[in-house]
Image (cartoon, helix red, strand yellow):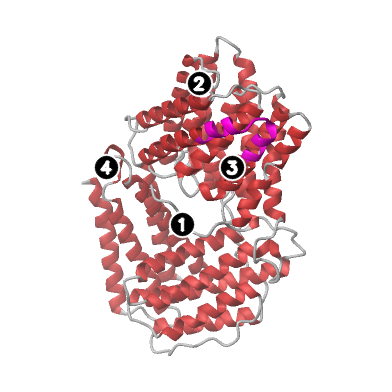
Amino acid sequence: MRTQRGPVPWNAVTRGALAAVPLLVAVLADRPTAGVPAALGAMLAGINDRPGSRRASVARLGFPAVAGGAGLLLGTLVAAAAGSGRSLAVLPLTIGLLGLVAGAFSSTGPVASASGTQVLVATVIGAGMPLPEPGPVRALLFLAGAGWLLLLRLLLPSPGGLGHGPYRLDGERAAVAAVYEAAARLLRATGGPRALAERAALSAALDHAQDALAGPRLRRYASSAAERRLHSQYAAAFPLAEAATALAWAGVPLPARIAEGPHRLAAAVRTGEPCGPVPAPARTDAGLRALDDALLRAATVFDHPAAAPSGRPKGESVPSLVGRAWSAAGREYGLRVAVCCATSTVVAQLLHHEHWYWLPATTVFLVKPDLGPLASRVVCRAAGTVAGAAVFGLLALLLSGPLPLVASVALCGALLPVATRHFAVQTAVVTVLVLCLVLLGGEPAATWGRVVESLLACATVLLVGHIPLPGNRGNSVRAALDTAAGAAHRYLGHVLDSPQDHEGKGALRRDAYRSLAAARTVIELSAAELPTVARHSAGSAGVAEALERLIDTTTACAVQLDRPSSELPPSHAELLVRRLSELDRARAAPAQ
């Protein structure tokens, strides 16, 4: 229920307003219905237009847009095949089966979740929204609208991004600089109550930078030198993060001057200039020696950039994604999405409502796994829909004609990047936008019908989301914890067996901390659900805490074994055994 905070993303606001240009062109050409699919594509792409690098936005906006275009085409084909009199069987069955597959894949990550949502929403809209354009044309128009927003994302420079290297890489530079800033904050917090939170913030910054650098190359040959430099600077942050984590684990406060080195490195990333001399810590123990070595290596990389490291961040392979989608967690979520979508479609068909597609489309948004607990999503959806309908009703009294509707769509597009910080506000903005598009598409206004359909969808999702289905509940939590535990054990085994393999050790440490962060997110989401759902994840927070202590201790051991012929101190070995025992007890506790 809390609102996310942060500065206003004025560049995204500008893109959201300009996203209405295809709709404006269609209205001026006296073909407003042709602009509706383009505006829908731009709207859904705008919801996915989050802060980050340009290269990452290609997948974050592009894959869901392709899925949405395919869904719009599929919906029109299904509607043509169903006709009248067979929709109670054909439409619910088709949408339910599609929900099973899309829901299962939605559980594998944020891009997959957005793609699954768009394919379902677009299929429902394609089947129910009466537009004169044929299915293939609708799909192309949808892709054109989403592609227009993606083009704006790639071409428009970010504010303050000029003058420090290729503006195409300003998101990547900001992400890498944030890693060094997070390391500086962790060093300052060492020995204090904020150390654990700052360690988690450093891990999140590394995750964000990894995602920012993992996208496709843009103008490969023109920007290869700048890209190599960024990859080298990101790789140089790994040993610095390891040393900072080990020092925070030791819990001994450090002099304030030690944090100046990472601060200067962060400034060098942003400006593209050499970092110059950095303050060196006294080499009095293993952690401070590791920090000194890490700062020295980073300064060398910054002042004399070498070729990019061989281990470029890569995405998952298709077989691994399919395996995760059809895991117990994927099947559980996919089944619930399928039941929700099929049920809402049957209810909508029985009501014979002219805008029946609103009910299953709203259901799709409500069952998304990454928008907070189910009960709060339902409350926010209901409140946002009522507020949005009231605003549109007021606009309808004051405005008339297509151009004011286009202006309203542009205003809603500009508000979307800020509205996505709270689901109720996002719902209100989307409600106004959709009701404007309904009028432009030639359908009669149905302001309060939209409210009724949304409330029915809320009731459907709230009911289906809490009824018992075949199989065990809480599979997503167990799967996330199993993944994190496996990553932690691989990291520990590598540290003990091959302590001098710095590249492999860094990659496994990243995997361990990233898996732990993902598990914590799933656990917090499950714990915030109603008791009928939350009880299935009882004890999982204790497992995550035990994993965190094990990974932090493993990092401290890695620093101790960093030098050739170094041996693990007995105190560290005893603590490792204790951490492993704690993890085993914590994992066994929920099953008792």
- Give the main secondary structure, helix, strand or loop, of the magenta stretch: helix
- Residue 427 pos. (x, y %): 49, 39
Amino acid of disc 4: Arg
Name the residue carrying label 1. Answer: 5
Which is more foreground, mark 3 or mark 1? 3
Comparing 509 with 62, the one in front is 62
- Residue 390 pos. (x, y %): 49, 33
Which is more foreground, mark 3 or mark 2? 3
Amino acid of disc 3: Cys
Residue range (magenta): 391-409
Q: Earlier in the sequence, mark 2 or mark 1?
A: 1
Amino acid of disc 1: Arg
| Residue appearing at x 61%, y 53% in the figure | 12
Q: Earlier in the sequence, mark 3 or mark 2?
A: 2
Q: Mark 4 and mark 3: span between their CA atoms?
A: 39 Å
Which is more foreground, mark 4 or mark 1? 1
